[in-house]
Amino acid sequence: SDVYKRQAHDEAQQQKSQAQKVAARITEELREAEGRLKKAEERKVDLEGQMEKLQAEIAPVEAKLTAELAAYRRHADAQLLALARLLEALDPPLFQHLQRVSADNVFFAFRWVLCLFKRELRYEDVLRYWDALWSGRPDFLLFCCVAVLRWHKSTILDEALDFEEMLRLVQDLAGKIDVERMLQDARVLADSEQAAAIALPVICLLYTSPSPRDKRQSR
């Protein structure tokens, strides 16, 4: 019986020792986990601080960009409005058709005024056109738009093109416009009596944001 008791005692001691080792290992793992958690919390606080700093730096840039985009959109809208007025004066039947199909906002010509016909002209004609554009009157671009629309007047009227069809017509002109013919026809329109009778607003070809000096002078 003494042998049995000794064996039982030894087994109990072994189990106790193993339990203590397991407890010590768990305690160590918990300590390490707490250390990692503390570092993670510190890292979180640091990242939150960096995020707040970045947001503070980005906020004025975002506000400026939003204002610039709004101003650019107003500039483009002003050009399209002037184009509609010019088309109404130079070709009333064509403009009246656009009114009937709710396309008199001429938004289908947005790419023309946005890219200055860059997408519609062949590569070798772009510089030729831009040279004539910048050396002429500020609204010469609008006369070019009217000239191109008048080339397709019979198609527009005979087929009663609506806005979506006008948009497709404009897009299909990419790379197909005769630059010399467009410049010649636009000059004829610009020198016409109808053009002289309409007062178009002076609009720059491209929108440029005001410089700090311009802003100070406008105050």
Image: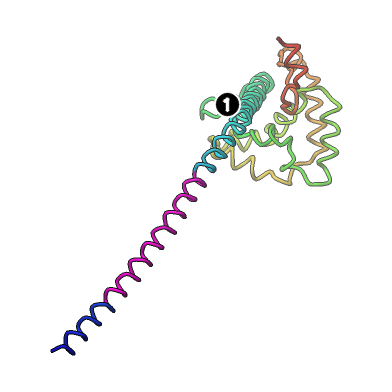
What residue is pinned by disc 1?
105
Colouring scheme applied when the structure was drawn: rainbow
- Residue 152, percent from left and from top: 66, 36
Closest to the observer: 88 or 107?
A: 107
The local crowd at label 1, few if under 14, some if 14 to 19, many if 20 or more residues have their Cα within 10 Å, is some
Residue 117 visible? The answer is yes
162 versus 187 height, above or below: below
Quarter occupied by the C terminus = top right
Residue 94 visible? The answer is no
Considering the numbered disc 1 on the image, is that residue within a helix, a strand or a loop? loop
Residue at (16, 88) in percent of width and height: 2
Identity, as a three-letter code, of the amino acid under mark 1? Asn
Please tell me whether residue 33 belongs to the stretch shown in magenta: yes
Quarter occupied by the N terminus = bottom left
Main secondary-structure element of the magenta-colored stretch: helix
- Residue 38, percent from left and from top: 46, 49
62 versus 196 height, above or below: below
* 92 to the left or right of 52: right
Please tell me whether residue 10 belongs to the stretch shown in magenta: no
- Residue 140, percent from left and from top: 78, 25
- Residue 203, percent from left and from top: 73, 21
Point out the stretch of residues depicted in magenta. Answer: 15-44
* 66 to the left or right of 34: right
Closest to the observer: 76 or 10?
A: 10
Residue at (59, 39) in percent of width and height: 167
Q: Quadrant of residue 14?
A: bottom left
44 versus 22 height, above or below: above
Closest to the observer: 72 or 153?
A: 72
Q: Residue furthest top?
A: 219
* 192 to the left or right of 61: right
Closest to the observer: 38 or 128?
A: 38
